[in-house]
Structure formats: C-alpha cells, structure tokens
C-alpha cells in the first residue's frame, strides 16, 4: 500500500529566505521518529547517503561534482543530536521525540541548490527502517559570504566548541589534538577552495605557528565510528586561541585568522565533516559534550583492537594497502559480531557482497590462528 500522506515540513518562508549572493549557510532540521526504532552504530553513513541522493535526484551535475570532485567537500552534515541511547547492539531513538540534524553549504553552488531543495523537501528521511518525519527546518548559521567574514568585526580571541569528535590526519594516523596549525589549516583548505581568494598556505601556517597561542582549553577524547573505514579517535570540548603581541606586524594574516574562526561553524574542523565529525560552534562551554551511545564506543574499540591484530598478521606485506585491508577486515568482522547482516555491511561500505563475505572469512581465520 502507498504511504499515507504526511504533513509537509513546517518551513515559514520568512525564515528560509536569503540573498542569492550567499556562499555560506547552515540549516537545522527537526526530525521526529514515527515509532521507537533502532539505528546501526555507523548511521551517519546513511545520513550522508540520503543527503547525496537528494542532490542526485534534483541536480545530477552537482551530484557528480560532490561525488567525484577532487577539492574539499563544499558541505557538512552532523550526526543526530538528541536523546539517543544504546539498546542491545543498536542505537535507540524514541517515538515522538525531536532530534536535531545540521547541514551546511560552503559554496554558492551548493547554497543555490539548497534554495530549491528546502522548497520541495520530502516528508520523511528514511534511515534504513527508521522513518524520521521532517517536522521543521530553520537557519542555524546565518547566510553570509567569505568577504563578509573577512570584513566583519571580531573579538580579541577565537573561542571554539567542538561538539562531535574531531580529529586530523597526521602521518597516516589520527591526531586528536587542536594544535593551532592543524585547526587553522583545516579552515584554510576550505577557504582557499571556495572563497575565490587563495592565500599562501605555507606562509600563513608559519605565521600561525609563530603567533597563535592557546590560552585555555578543556578537552576529552573518544573513539567514534565514522564513514566506511572504522574507528577514529577524536576530541570534544572547548578551546580559546589568542594572538601574541607581535602578531599585528602582518595585519592581513591577523584579519584572516579571525575570519577563519568565524568560518568554523560552517565548515567544521578536521576531517570526515561530511560524516558528522568536527561539528564546531563559536564560544566557550564548560558543560560536558553529549556522550556517545555505549554501543558506538564498544564497537569502535572492537574495530581498533581487530585492526591492530590484522595489521600484525599482514606486516610481512606492509604498506598502506595492507593497513587498509586490515581496517576493512576489522570493520566487517566487528559489525558482523554485532549482528549486522553482511548484505547491509556491503551496502554501507560500497563493496560487492561476495568480497565482504570473503573478507569476513579471512578475518575469522586470521583471528582463530591468533588464539
């Protein structure tokens, strides 16, 4: 039977209008489950896929760019924010409870698509057997441009809150510390790709290293499942950056420093921001960030432990390819141990079912030989 018509999202026109010159904007979706439902721990893969399917169905050319473009991704998405608990091997959402989901655009091209998108949103966001009604949409981060960020007034410090685990890539590993060069490098990459005014990366980062100070921070680390490659170690919390007294000798970099701080809520921090990592806001907060559901923590730790075992088994072959295979074996086996079907895992990882089936057999064999 066809689904009975649902109430359209509550989108007051006055709240969802912005200038056609906009380059940056953030939207907040209120999502409400129709029933109590369970989500697989790596559900942000599903949010990512749903969003890209929305683009593909309405603008194939933009979709091809988002899939295949070699530049930075001109959007971010968050995980769900709300009352999320663990139930057995799944994450549990409660019926008739509101959950918040954030999507941002980092380029004029994406925000132009969003203008049309919000006028014709579907009634539901379906996360594999977890139907979420789109109750309302509002603007979370004000529409602006890169030039306006550069020209706007600023405080004496850049103070940031990291709401979801945040991490950087360093020498092939995760680096869960907000070192100024790493933080501002992640913002500068987006700036150089989308602002239309490229800045000398080496010169600016050398200036950051010499002049940007950490004046206070409150951080904690956690392991989280993200994307298709298993667990990431990331930090949450708050940090305050300020400039050394001699920093004003290069005023253009000082102006850019504060502009990049204002860019943070739009572009997120670090990597995997299109899978929910690195959600960032302005300001300081000493309150604890929402804990990850237990099942996510347990699964992330299991994947990490298995990855190390399989890397050791494959150390004779060595290299990046061997490490990648070890991580895939670990992810597939751990998720199978948690009760997920191999068909579902294959779909999430974008791998042929037969390959996933072979990998889990090889992983079990390698694990058995370790006992």
Image: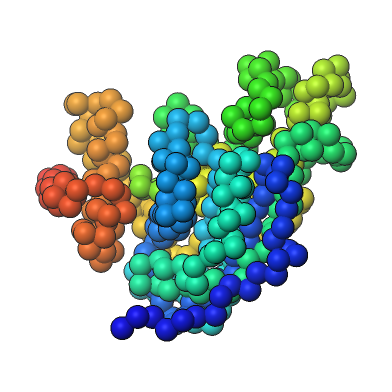
Q: Is residue 319 left or right of residue 79?
A: left
The type of colouring in the image is rainbow
User: Do we see residue 125 in this rendering?
Assistant: yes
Q: Residue at x 70, y 70 (%)?
A: 12
In this rendering, the count of numbered labels is 0
Q: Nearer the viewer, residue 323 or 312?
A: 323
Q: Position of residue 270 (x, y in %)?
A: 56, 39
Q: Nearer the viewer, residue 18 or 199?
A: 18
Q: Residue at x 41, y 77 (%)?
A: 37
Query: Where's the N terminus, which quadrant?
Result: bottom left
- Does residue 296 lie above or below 251 as drawn? below
Q: Position of residue 140 (x, y in %)?
A: 69, 58
Q: Is residue 340 left or right of residue 81?
A: left
Q: Residue at x 59, y 61 (%)?
A: 118
Q: Residue at x 67, y 49 (%)?
A: 25
Q: Position of residue 371 (x, y in %)?
A: 16, 49
Q: Position of residue 132 (x, y in %)?
A: 48, 72
- Does residue 3 lie above or below 371 as drawn? below
User: Do we see residue 85 in this rendering?
Assistant: no
Q: Nearer the viewer, residue 125 or 95?
A: 125
- Does residue 116 lie above or below 174 as drawn? below
């Amino acid at each position: 039977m066809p689904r009975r018509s649902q109430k359209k999202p509550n989108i007051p026109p006055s709240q969802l209008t912005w200038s056609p010159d906009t380059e940056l904007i953030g939207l907040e979706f209120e999502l409400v489950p129709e029933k109590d439902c369970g989500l697989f721990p790596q559900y942000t893969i599903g949010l990512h896929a749903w969003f890209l399917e929305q683009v593909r169905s309405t603008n194939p050319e933009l979709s091809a760019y988002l899939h295949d473009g070699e530049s930075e991704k001109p959007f971010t998405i968050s995980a769900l924010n709300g009352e999320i608990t663990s139930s057995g091997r799944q994450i549990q959402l409660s019926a008739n409870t509101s959950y918040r989901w954030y999507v941002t655009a980092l380029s004029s091209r994406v925000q132009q698509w969003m203008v049309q998108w919000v006028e014709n949103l579907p009634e539901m966001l379906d996360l594999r057997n977890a139907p979420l009604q789109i109750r309302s949409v509002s603007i979370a981060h004000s529409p602006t441009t890169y030039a306006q960020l550069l020209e706007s007034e600023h405080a004496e410090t850049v103070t940031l809150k990291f709401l979801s685990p945040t991490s950087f890539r360093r020498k092939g590993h995760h680096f869960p510390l907000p070192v100024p060069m790493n933080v501002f490098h992640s913002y500068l990459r987006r700036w150089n790709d989308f602002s239309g005014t490229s800045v000398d990366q080496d010169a600016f980062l050398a200036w950051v290293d010499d002049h940007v100070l950490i004046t206070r921070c409150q951080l904690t680390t956690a392991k989280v499942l993200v994307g298709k490659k298993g667990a990431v170690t990331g930090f949450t919390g708050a940090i305050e950056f300020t400039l050394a007294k001699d920093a004003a000798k290069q005023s253009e970099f000082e102006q850019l420093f504060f502009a990049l701080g204002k860019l943070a809520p739009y572009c997120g921090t670090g990597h995997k921001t299109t899978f929910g990592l690195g959600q960032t806001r302005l300001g300081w907060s000493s309150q604890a960030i929402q804990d990850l559901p237990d099942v996510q923590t347990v699964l992330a730790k299991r994947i990490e432990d298995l990855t190390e075992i399989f890397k050791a088994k494959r150390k004779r072959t060595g290299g990046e390819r061997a490490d990648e295979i070890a991580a895939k074996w670990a992810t597939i086996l751990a998720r199978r141990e948690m009760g997920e079907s191999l068909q579902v895992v294959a779909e999430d990882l974008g791998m042929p079912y037969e390959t996933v089936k072979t990998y889990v057999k090889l992983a079990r064999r390698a694990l058995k030989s370790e006992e």
